[in-house]
């Protein structure tokens, strides 16, 4: 069964360092998403991406964050200068269709746990 | 703006007992509603969804949920809990033009 894969599963970094989280969405999916979950809090939407550009982003997704689809398979989230409060589980997701328009299902990866010291 | 509230961050049941996980939503337009489950060390997996039509929806693993517009609720139930149901459950809502918004999650524990 096709699945979304994320790497690394856990990354520890020093405050101020750049981090890149990688995701390989399901191959025929066109819409890509990043969500995060700070320990003990809700899963929060960060950004959605379609046709090589951001289609929607939340207030959390500030200038420190960026996303990229550098090739036909990977979808990356970059945090330029990490802060302590960026420590969270980051989930990548993909869908065939835009969820809002057609209630297409989001398929999630297992998450990348980021710990900022 | 839409939102989701899950009542109870932790629910404990005995094996064979009824499972009831509560979810209330707030949306200015008819919402689409979802329940996702996260087993330990795994990603989020769709359990079931309500878009239009029948208000009682059935999902995987014997779970079902009923959309009640008058109560703005979408509670998740299962008649008989199994040990393998122990996981974290997330209710989520979406309205046209918005991203999927999750609740804080409810951890379900099942004891023998």
Image (spheres, helix red, strand yellow):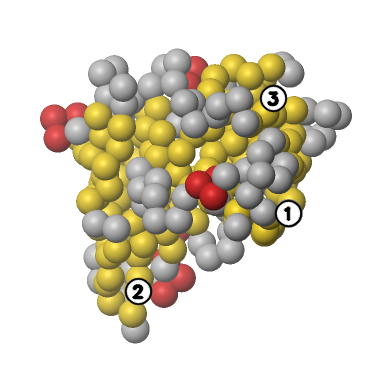
Crowding at dot 3, Cα within 10 Å, few <14 / some 14-19 / many 20+, comes out as some
Tell me which residue sits at (74%, 34%) in the image: A75
Tell me which residue sits at (30%, 45%) in the image: B65
Q: Nearer the viewer, residue A52 or B13?
A: A52
Q: Chain of mark 1?
A: A
Give the farthest residue toward the bottom.
B112
Query: Which of pointers 3 and 1 indicates the residue nearer the eye?
Result: 1
User: Whole-Å distance between the Cαs marked 2 and 1?
Assistant: 31 Å
**In the drawing, what numbered circle is on residue A8?**
1
Give the farthest residue toward the left.
B70
Task: Give the quadrant of the C terminus of chain A.
Answer: bottom right
**Vertically, is A116 above or below B34?**
below
Tell me which residue sits at (36%, 62%) in the image: B107
Residue at the spot of label 3: A30
Among the 4 quarters of the image, the one containing residue B49 = top left
Residue at the spot of label 2: B110
* Mark nearer the N terminus (3 vs 1): 1
Query: Which of pointers 2 and 1 indicates the residue nearer the eye?
Result: 1
User: Whole-Å distance between the Cαs marked 3 and 2?
Assistant: 38 Å
Q: Position of residue A107 (x, y in %)?
A: 60, 41
**Vertically, is A34 above or below A96?**
below
Q: Chain of mark 2?
A: B
Local secondary structure at mark 2 = strand
Local secondary structure at mark 3 = loop
């Amino acid at each position: 069964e096709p699945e979304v894969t994320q790497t690394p599963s856990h990354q520890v970094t020093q405050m101020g360092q750049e981090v890149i989280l990688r995701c390989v969405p399901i191959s025929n999916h066109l819409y890509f998403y990043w969500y995060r979950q700070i320990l003990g809090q809700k899963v929060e939407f960060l950004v959605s991406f379609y046709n090589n550009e951001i289609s929607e982003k939340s207030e959390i997704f500030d200038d420190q964050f960026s996303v990229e689809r550098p090739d036909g398979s990977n979808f990356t989230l970059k945090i330029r200068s990490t802060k302590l409060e960026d420590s969270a589980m980051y989930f990548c997701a993909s869908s065939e269709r835009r969820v809002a328009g057609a209630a297409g299902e989001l398929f999630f990866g297992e998450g990348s746990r980021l710990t900022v010291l | 703006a839409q939102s989701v509230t899950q009542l109870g961050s932790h629910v404990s049941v005995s094996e064979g007992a009824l499972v009831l996980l509560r979810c209330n939503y707030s949306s200015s337009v008819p919402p689409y509603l979802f329940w996702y489950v996260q087993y330990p060390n795994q990603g989020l997996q769709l359990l079931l969804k309500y878009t239009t039509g029948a208000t009682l929806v059935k999902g995987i693993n014997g779970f079902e949920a009923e959309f009640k517009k008058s109560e703005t609720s979408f509670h998740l139930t299962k008649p008989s809990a199994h040990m393998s149901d122990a996981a974290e459950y997330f209710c989520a809502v979406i309205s046209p033009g918005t991203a999927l918004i999750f609740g804080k999650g409810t951890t379900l524990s099942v004891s023998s």
